[in-house]
Image (cartoon, coloured by chain):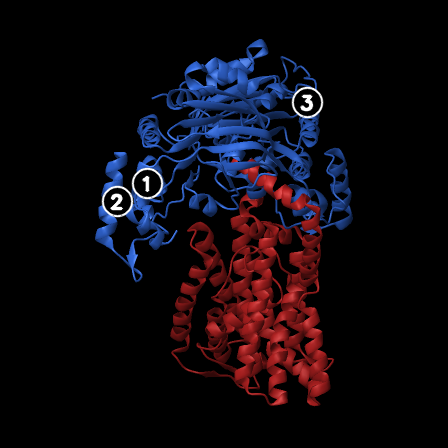
Amino acid sequence: MSAGTFEEHPHRTADTPGDDLVVAGVSKRFGGVPALSDVSLAIEPGKVHALIGENGAGKSTLGKIISGVIEPDEGTLTLGGRSLVLRSPREALAHGIVTIAQELAIVPGLTVAENVYLGSEVATAGFVRRREVHRRFRELAHRVHFELSPDVLAGNISTADRQKVEIMRALSRNASIVVMDEPSAALSSHESAALHEVIRSLARQGSAVVLISHFLSEVLSLSDIITTLRDGRLISTVDAKTATEESLIEGMLGRSWTAAFPEKVPVDADAPVVLEVDHVSARGVLDCSLVLRRGEILGIAGLVGAGRSELARAIFRDAKISGGTVRLNGTGLAKRSPHRSIQRGLVLIPESRKEMGLLMGRSVRENISLSRLDLVSRLGWIAGIRERRAVSQLMKKTTVKAANMGMSATMLSGGNQQKLLFARSVMCSPSVLIADEPTRGVDVGAKRAIYDLLVEMAQDGMGIIVISSELEEVLGLAHRTLVMRHGRITAELTGDDMNEQAVLAAAFSETNAT
Amino acid sequence: MTNQIDDHLDELEEGDTALGGLRSASSRLLHSWRTAGILIPFLVLFAVLSITSQPFLHTTNLINILDQQAATLCIAAAGTLVLVAGGIDLSVGATYGLATVVAGEIAAHHSPVLAIVAAIAVGLFVGLLNGLIVTVFKINALITTLAMSFVIGGLALKVSGGNLIVLSANSGFYKFANSQFLTVPSAVWMTLAFVVVLGLLLSRTTFGRYMVASGGNAEAGRLAGVRVNRIRVVTFTLSGGAAALGGVIDISRLLSAQAASGGSALAFTVLAGIVVGGTSIAGGEGSVWRTGIGVLFIALIGNGFNLLGIDPLYQQIVLGVILLIAVGLDSWARQRRS
């Protein structure tokens, strides 16, 4: 938005209530996998409208459609009765729709005020009018009751304050609809209390707030209307007054597809312990202890940001440990070295295969053999035939589907990419495998194949830790489940205690209560 | 959730058939650029020069080109490894200069063997230092090697006292690069051997694989058990050693040494050769033999311009444009992939 347009409508939002944003019959598929199916709802000005659901339920997808990040395959958006086609966040902005994303778009080297007016600088002939900026900033801050100094560098302020900057930026651009995706996920309870006040005041001033959140207590206390999504479908839209935590959880879980998991094979009670984690603390991890036996699948559940991946990387000795010990097959893993962990028989499949797992531009073969090139080489010279033979066996075992092993990893589907990491792990023949989000972004068919693989690997004598944001996955695979919250293991569930209600209770319970 | 969406989006793009056809066509084109790459323009230029210039195809001229490019070829071959492993070495010109004066000073008074060994040891040490600074102190490789090139340049001046060192053609040192075998000087043979060894190192050994992993995705490599820092240190050390080898070859060829020889001009010529050869400036992709062709391609342009009597001014412009095209293709390829 140019400075000119800004000048013309200085106060459009504050005084004039916006129009209803109506989402009608919206569907969206990603690579054949439906993310949203036929969802309809109305977002009214002056109301906080919450979207809830499990990870992958489609709430963020819906948020992104509303804010113009992605376009729906089917269905329409209308704003005040006029049809709305949003091709980019910029177009959404032009209609007064602003997103405050999970990752904040703050320029740390600019001041708070400069960040607020970033891209819509108050300027004359290219020179920023500093005094005018300050005046407007104060006016705006006063309106939303924020106490922020305009001249502090944005890099030096707290996450909550950065969020305030984002919100002020949204307001300075005449936002009538504000989409917030997990706004309090990164905040302390004190900070989120402040944020809640802001959200309420936004609604009071006539903006519509679309709140996407994991935290049921937050949703219940803040919103006027709650829409529950599951597997991309709209389950219910209810008045927040009539909803309870139980009813919402019920709606989020619903009837689940159960046939998706292989049968659990019981673990011998006297199976040897392969991994002992004793009072480990690390960045994002507080005093965690666990024991893993041969053949056992241990699930770790918890919200995103609860410290699950951090724990995995501390155990893998990729992260510094500030206290405690990790023992693999009875001997300590003292030094921080993934290389040594792998040599000793501990393998990690990281949470993000593209950023942390694969060499995307390289071949299937190179990706699979990377960790154990020593097995197919002599004195550092790679024996081509031996490597190809080993890789083709591993591809068979892990059911990687690729036209040939020279194909680059980019060309494979998400499921096959994930299987490459499993093939690599199998080649290491480890005694412990940690699989972090093993089926993220993988379609249902490939999911089942990966589950089978995990069970098979456990039967082959590995101890396996499965970390997943998909509750069903943890419960469907694991013999035992640990629940993490705020870096600690808050519950250990086995047998009949291992159910969704219990996990959710341990993971959610009042985490963000104010 | 966000990641999930991103993954889905990627799958969407990959799955879309209408787009897919176009994508695969363009990626095939890119793939062939990467594998054949510079070879085609090189052969075209070679053919053009053969036709347009009488003296070009003479064995003397061709061997002369190789002899002149020996140092650059050695340094660029090692530089390719640095780039593939995710680093960059701008200090090679200065290291080259330091090696020439060290070798020159020692050769003037002591045995030529000692001179060669000492110069290469100095080069290896400089490279090791570069590698350690980059990995242990986590200072950006570009800045580290740029800063180091000033330090090394100063040292070289200190060693030579700012003087031009001239060696006699009778010294045994002269034979190092100028012994003839099958009418080809030893400088060319050594370079050939060096380039072939580094080429095999990159393409056929576990070490080569680890370099690719370190440069392609350091995080993924580390989590897969690759000791990324160690690999990078070795590539820098090799690069320093190669710069010294180049320096020794040249002082033996030319029998004179000067602290200021090499310098940033050499560092940039080397980098240009590597990049024109299709090695990615961002790491994780590259090949030594294509670097060789890249270096020779640039040399042919120079040679051709001389033989055809074209103003050398245009040579610079042409080189610049070619560089931009090479880098542009690389970044285009990367955008396609992500």
Q: Amino acid at mark 2?
A: Phe
Residue B46: give x, y in percent of width and height: 70, 79
The tint of chain B in the picture is red
Residue B170: give x, y in percent of width and height: 57, 86
The residue that disc 2 covers is: A137
Residue A234 sits in quarter: top right
Residue A277: give x, y in percent of width and height: 50, 24
Which mark identifies residue A260? 3
Q: Amino acid at mark 3?
A: Ala
Mark closest to the chain's N terminus, 2 or 1 = 2
Q: Secondary structure at mark 1?
A: helix
Q: CA distance from mark 2 to mark 1?
A: 9 Å
For the residues labelled 2 and 1, say whether their Cβ atoms are less than 8 Å apart: yes
Q: The residue marked by circle 2 belongs to what chain?
A: A
Answer yes or no: is residue B58 visible.
no
Vertical placement of A195 versus B281: above or below?
A: above
The residue that disc 1 covers is: A168
Q: Which is nearer the eye, A431 or A166?
A: A166
Vertical placement of B104 versus B144: above or below?
A: below
Chain that is blue in the image: A
Vertical placement of B150 versus A413: above or below?
A: below
